[in-house]
Image (tube, rainbow, N blue to C red):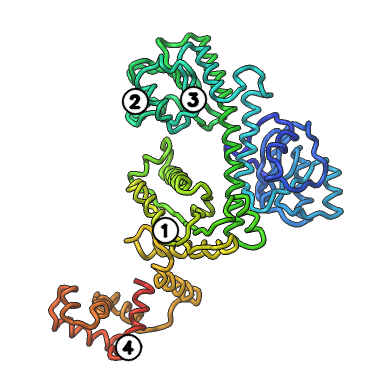
């Protein structure tokens, strides 16, 4: 057992009963032992058998990779040494007399995490819950404890100016009354529910976001609009959740700065709870979609809960590679890798919005790095046109490709549609850079070639054959016999056309043909030899 990396361990004082209620049956499906609902939770520890244990009283221990009764007993005993409040392992929990005895002796319950639930998701939810209690303690009863709009109005009354609460991308999450007292930039922000792009650029050029996110105190800004602003970051621990912006006439007094700082902590409560709720909803939807796409007995039930039982549908599979223009999708830059993840998430969200505008019953979720969508459609060509319209809409903001599966008449058939979408997507990513979307039927031969290449690789590579001999000869002698053969085959044996494509004289080309036949042993007069050569050339272009 060991303390996790920075950010994985969180201090807090939430009672165990409230934490378990928030996790709910979506995540915790079984229990060994009786949890003490009043026991305070002190943080989160991720099990690491190769690191020394660190004591964190009241911790919830995540038993990643713990299976079998003996391992559960060992984990409970370690948790007792650490003073933990509870242990979570993957369900079904292996229970025998030794497990029950260990749980009773340690007074530490073992909780079963539902199959398919993400450990990262559980850790994030626990961090959010504990951060909430660390920020504000027990839920407040003042007006500030209402929704975000009530909070914005309360801040506006305290500071005597119109207020917006925004996320890290400048999207308006809530705003107060009295916006007519602002300026044109503020009015445009409210109407679009988004800070204008030119204002975001101006703030970035002035380094305003860098100063805002590095400080806990309110930041006074002049010259970015007709009227000054005071802004403060909304944070939970080291994580930036968003910001609060107030249109003011002059810098705040010290008392008003303290009031805004207190309001930012309450805003963090709202944003954390909002995100936790959204995460649970997204996770549940993703789990239902995963169940549906896997097929089997659970597919009809998952389809019914997603509203996808009554009509035929196709599966779309989207993957992205960000382009230089993709920063318009990204949040405040952190690192190139983080920006790529954020951009991919944004494009997946944009796909969901696009499809829901076409058909309200569309279900979308990202599974294993691929965004899948189940789109009600009567033909895969109709689904492909929808995918194409989305890719045209995002333009050069990302290099995205979408594979389209065939029509599934029943929920149980969506597994096959997903497999077809995955095959088409792989072709788009590995063999057809000229296409951005495709039905499997349109790229079926390419898909077969990829499968055949996989089989050859599994078998340890192709045996000695004419193309292998040509490639080895070319590598050793600096010749282009393989390219010569490919040109001749592509030209259907027309030496004039093939030599022109290679920019050599026809007689030179004829000499190379004779030479490659000698080196490789190919008899180009037989159709079987020509087919074999074409196949091997396309397996490893």
Residue 341 visible to the viewer: no
- For marks 3 and 1, give the CA distance: 41 Å
**Residue 386, how many percent across, how many down?**
41, 53
Q: Residue at x 49, y 52 (%)?
A: 371
Q: Nearer the viewer, mark 2 or mark 1?
A: 1
**Among the two numbered marks 2 and 1 on one chain, the one whose residue lies closer to the N terminus:** 2
Report helix, strand or loop for mark 2: loop
**Among the two numbered marks 3 and 1 on one chain, the one whose residue lies closer to the N terminus:** 3
Task: Residue 165: give its label.
Answer: 3
Residue 221: name its quadrant: top left
**Residue 453, how many percent across, how many down?**
44, 73
Q: Is residue 541 above or below residue 394?
A: below
- For marks 2 and 3, give the CA distance: 21 Å
Query: To which residue does mark 1 refer?
Result: 382
Q: Is residue 504 above or below residue 307?
A: below
**Among the two numbered marks 4 and 3 on one chain, the one whose residue lies closer to the N terminus:** 3
Q: Residue at x 46, y 65 (%)?
A: 423
Q: Is residue 244 above or below residue 52?
A: above
**Within 10 Å of the Cα at label 2, are there few (<14), some (14-19), or many (20+) other Cα atoms?**
few
- For marks 2 and 1, give the CA distance: 48 Å
Task: Residue 206: give its label.
Answer: 2
Given contact means CB atoms under 8 Å apart, are the residues at marks 2 and 4 in contact? no
Q: Residue at x 48, y 49 (%)?
A: 359
Report helix, strand or loop for mark 3: strand
**Among the two numbered marks 2 and 4 on one chain, the one whose residue lies closer to the N terminus:** 2
For the N terminus, the image quarter is top right
**Among the two numbered marks 1 and 4 on one chain, the one whose residue lies closer to the N terminus:** 1
Query: To which residue does mark 4 refer?
Result: 527
């Amino acid at each position: 057992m060991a303390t996790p990396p920075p950010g994985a361990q969180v201090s807090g004082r939430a009672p165990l009963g409230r934490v378990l209620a928030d996790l709910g049956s979506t995540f915790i499906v079984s229990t060994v032992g009786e949890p003490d609902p009043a026991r305070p939770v002190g943080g989160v520890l991720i099990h690491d058998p190769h690191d020394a244990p660190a004591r964190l009283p009241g911790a919830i221990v995540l038993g990643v990779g713990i299976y079998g009764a003996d391992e559960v007993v060992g984990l409970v005993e370690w948790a007792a040494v650490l003073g933990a409040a509870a242990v979570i392992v993957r369900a079904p929990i292996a229970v025998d007399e030794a497990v029950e005895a260990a749980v009773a002796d340690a007074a530490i319950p073992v909780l079963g995490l539902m199959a398919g639930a993400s450990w990262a998701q559980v850790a994030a939810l626990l961090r959010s819950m504990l951060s909430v209690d660390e920020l504000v303690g027990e839920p407040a009863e003042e007006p500030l404890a209402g929704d975000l709009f009530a909070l914005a109005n309360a801040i506006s009354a305290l500071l005597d100016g119109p207020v917006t609460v925004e996320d890290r991308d400048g999207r308006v999450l809530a705003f107060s009354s009295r916006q007519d007292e602002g300026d044109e930039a503020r009015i445009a922000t409210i109407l679009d529910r988004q800070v204008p792009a030119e204002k975001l650029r101006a703030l970035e050029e002035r380094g305003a976001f860098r100063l805002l996110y590095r400080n806990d105190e309110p930041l006074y800004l002049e010259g970015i609009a007709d009227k000054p602003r005071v802004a403060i970051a909304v944070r939970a621990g080291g994580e930036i959740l968003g910001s609060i912006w107030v249109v003011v006439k002059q810098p705040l007094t010290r008392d008003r700065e303290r009031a805004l700082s207190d309001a930012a902590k309450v805003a963090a409560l709202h944003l954390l709870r909002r995100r936790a709720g959204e995460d649970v909803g997204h996770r549940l939807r993703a789990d239902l979609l995963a169940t549906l796409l896997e097929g089997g007995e659970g597919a009809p039930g998952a389809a019914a809960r997603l509203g996808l039982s009554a009509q035929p549908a196709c599966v779309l599979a989207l993957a992205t590679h960000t382009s230089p223009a993709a920063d318009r999708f990204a949040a405040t830059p952190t690192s190139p890798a983080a920006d790529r993840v954020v951009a991919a998430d944004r494009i997946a969200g944009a796909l969901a919005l696009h499809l829901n505008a076409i058909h309200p019953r569309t279900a979308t979720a990202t599974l294993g790095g691929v965004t899948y969508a189940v789109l009600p459609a009567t033909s895969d060509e109709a689904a492909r046109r929808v995918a194409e319209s989305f890719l045209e809409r995002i333009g050069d903001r990302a290099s995205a490709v979408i594979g389209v599966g065939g029509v599934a008449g029943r929920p149980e058939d969506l597994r096959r549609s997903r497999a077809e979408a995955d095959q088409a997507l792989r072709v788009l990513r590995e063999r057809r850079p000229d296409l951005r979307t495709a039905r499997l039927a349109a790229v079926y031969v390419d898909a077969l070639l990829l499968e055949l290449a996989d089989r050859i690789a599994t078998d340890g590579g192709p045996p000695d054959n004419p193309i292998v001999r040509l490639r080895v000869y070319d590598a050793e002698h600096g010749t282009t016999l393989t390219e010569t053969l490919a040109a001749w085959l592509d030209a259907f044996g027309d030496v004039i056309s093939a030599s022109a494509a290679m920019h050599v004289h026809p007689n030179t080309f004829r000499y190379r043909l004779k030479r490659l036949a000698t080196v490789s042993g190919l008899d180009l007069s037989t159709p079987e030899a020509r087919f074999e050569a074409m196949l091997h050339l396309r397996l490893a272009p």
